């Protein structure tokens, strides 16, 4: 069944939000590349790639349901951070924003009795739990590390092993 125009519009906008996330993480990776923390740079690049995959999942779903993808312009991402922890806090805030947007789409799917979209979105709801958790875990570890360069480099090395 063809998707409703309201829901189709929201999913089209979500493609833009996921691509914006992709871009923000890429800018975070670029900033980390200017620091000694190559592990965090790698972590951000991997996350950036995941966000592009999210955008493509919405892209495919909208097409599969007879909607039309219309790509919009992306905003300039934030390019400078005061500290490693500030960078991860920015990433967490971005994820929290995305979670709220997905909740809004889910609510609309419920309102319109669109069972397929609810089912489709359940993967994203779970994914957001994991993404918020991984950013928060990193912030908690960074708080523990404090001003110790030795501990920070160890955390950076661990972040670099992310698959
Ligand atoms: Fe995402
Ligand atoms: Fe994400």
Image (tube, helix red, strand yellow):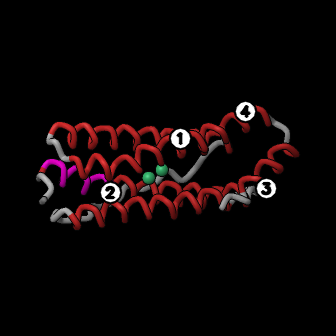
Q: Nearer the viewer, residue 118 or 25?
A: 118
Quadrant in which residue 60 is drawn: bottom left
The residue singled out by tag 3 in the image is 157
The residue singled out by tag 4 in the image is 143
Q: Are marks 3 and 2 in contact (CB under 8 Å)?
A: no
Mark 1 / mark 2, whichever is N-terminal: 2
Q: Are marks 2 and 4 in contact (CB under 8 Å)?
A: no
> Which class describes the residues within 10 Å of circle 4: few (<14), some (14-19), or many (20+)?
few
Span colored in magenta: 6-16
- Residue at screen point 76% across, 53% down: 158
In this rendering, is residue 138 above or below 27?
Answer: above
Quadrant in which residue 135 is drawn: top right
Image position, residue 90 (x, y; %): 54, 42
- Residue at screen point 50% across, 60% down: 50
Name the outermost residue toward the right.
150
Q: Is mark 3 within 8 Å of ligand 2?
A: no
Mark 2 / mark 4, whichever is N-terminal: 2
State the SS at label 1.
helix
Distance between mark 3 and mark 2 Cα atoms: 32 Å
The residue singled out by tag 1 in the image is 132
State the SS at label 4.
helix
The residue singled out by tag 2 in the image is 16
Dominant secondary structure of the residues highlighted in magenta in the image: helix
- Residue at screen point 85% across, 44% down: 149
Distance between mark 2 and mark 4 Cα atoms: 32 Å
Distance between mark 1 and mark 3 Cα atoms: 21 Å
Mark 3 / mark 2, whichever is N-terminal: 2
């Amino acid at each position: 069944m063809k998707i409703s125009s309201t829901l189709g519009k929201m999913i089209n906008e979500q493609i833009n939000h996921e691509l914006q996330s992709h871009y923000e993480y890429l800018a975070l990776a670029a900033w980390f590349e200017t620091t000694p923390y190559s592990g965090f740079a790698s972590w951000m690049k991997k996350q950036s790639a995941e966000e592009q995959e999210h955008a493509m999942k919405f892209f495919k779903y909208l097409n599969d349901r007879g909607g039309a993808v219309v790509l919009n312009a992306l905003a300039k991402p934030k390019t400078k951070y005061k500290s490693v922890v500030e960078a991860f806090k920015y990433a967490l805030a971005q994820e929290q924003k995305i979670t709220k947007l997905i909740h809004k789409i889910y609510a609309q799917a419920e309102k319109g009795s669109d069972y397929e979209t609810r089912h489709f979105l359940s993967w994203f709801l779970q994914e957001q739990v994991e993404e918020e958790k991984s950013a928060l875990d990193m912030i908690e570890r960074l708080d523990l590390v404090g001003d110790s360069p030795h501990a920070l480099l160890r955390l950076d090395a661990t972040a670099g092993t992310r698959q």
